[in-house]
């Protein structure tokens, strides 16, 4: 049985005051969301204060990025061992915004995935197609390519300590959610692709859906056989909405 995970990607949002409000709101409702696992991924500068606020709640936290090297002359970077110093559970790698805005290639994403593993942090590997790619009929080709980069560097067994997030780029921050059936089709494809290398790993790996998930559509998505929770952007900044999504997973 795969435990549902709902992870909030705050992106470059938040402030000291807003974070206190958001975490206070979350803490008030975490007892009412059943067995769903919850994680939040704030900007780097707020990670340790959010970690302190979450202490004892059972909610996990993660970073939105991770450096490939472990230390040294890499101005502006943050390594896995530094994250681990604070008890980091997850690191998002390969988010479409980093691929599109910061030129992250499949190879670099795979190296970041490997860096997270080296530090004992579970990567949340984002994959997904653009609108143009979907309309061109190459969704599965794109997703397979993104996944293969990681599998060939780290091997299928690495997915025992990782999470995959299918995030169609056309659905991120646009208000256009994939339907349950549209998402399920790609999730089933991803699981079958993993199963080609290991049926056991495929059975256990959690595949989250991301792209304009809200309290109102989460239940339909999470009811799908191969959808094991969500990676939530905008709606994770509103405690009540995020908790509604978490409840939909229980
Ligand atoms: C995301 O950025 O990972 C995301 C899914 O964003 P949103 O929920 O705002 O579409």
Image (cartoon, rainbow, N blue to C red):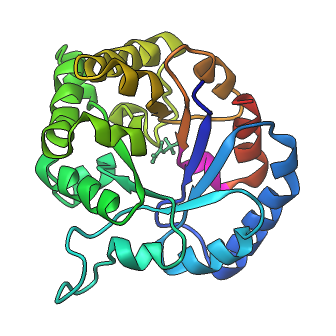
245 inside magenta stretch: no
Quadrant, the N terminus: top right
| Left or right for 157, reference 220 | left
Residue beneath the point at 21% across and 61% down: 102
Residue at left offset 30%, top offset 18%: 195
Left/right placement of residue 79 relative to residue 220 reads: left
In the picture, measured across the screen, residue 52 lies left or right of residue 197, that is right
Q: Which quadrant of the figure has residue 187? A: top left
Note whether residue 17 is visible: yes
Q: Is residue 234 magenta?
A: yes
Residue 189's x, y, as percent?
32, 15
The magenta stretch spans which residues? Answer: 232-237
The residue located at (63%, 17%) in the rendering is 223
Identify the image quadrant of residue 133.
top left
Q: Which secondary structure type mostly characterizes the magenta part of the structure?
A: helix
Most foreground residue, 139 or 47:
47
Q: Position of residue 211 (x, y in %)?
A: 47, 35
- The residue positioned 74% from the left and 65% from the top of the image is 23
State the residue in front, 83 or 126: 83
Note whether 97 is above or below 72 in the view shown. above
x, y (%) of residue 127? Answer: 30, 37
Looking at this view, is 199 or 220 the one in front?
199
């Amino acid at each position: 049985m795969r435990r549902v995970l709902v992870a909030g990607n705050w992106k470059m949002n938040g402030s000291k005051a807003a974070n206190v409000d958001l975490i206070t709101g979350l803490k008030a409702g975490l007892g009412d969301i059943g067995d769903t696992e919850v994680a939040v991924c704030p900007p780097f500068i707020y990670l340790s204060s959010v970690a302190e606020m979450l202490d004892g709640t059972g909610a996990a936290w993660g970073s939105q990025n991770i450096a490939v090297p472990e230390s040294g002359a890499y101005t502006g970077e943050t390594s896995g061992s530094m994250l681990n110093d604070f008890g980091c559970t997850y690191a998002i790698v390969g988010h479409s915004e980093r691929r599109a805005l910061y030129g992250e290639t499949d190879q670099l994403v795979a190296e970041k995935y490997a860096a997270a593993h080296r530090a004992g942090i579970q990567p949340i590997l984002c994959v997904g197609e653009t609108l143009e790619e979907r309309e061109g009929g190459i969704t599965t080709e794109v997703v397979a390519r993104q996944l293969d980069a990681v599998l060939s560097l780290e091997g299928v067994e690495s997915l025992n300590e990782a999470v995959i997030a299918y995030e169609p780029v056309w659905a991120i921050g646009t208000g256009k959610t994939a339907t349950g059936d549209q998402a399920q089709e790609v999730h089933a494809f991803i699981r079958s692709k993993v199963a080609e290398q290991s049926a056991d790993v495929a059975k256990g790996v959690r595949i989250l859906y991301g792209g304009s998930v809200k309290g109102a559509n989460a239940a339909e998505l999470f009811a799908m056989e191969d959808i094991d929770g969500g990676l939530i952007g905008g709606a994770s900044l509103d405690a009540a909405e995020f908790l509604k999504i978490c409840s939909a997973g229980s």
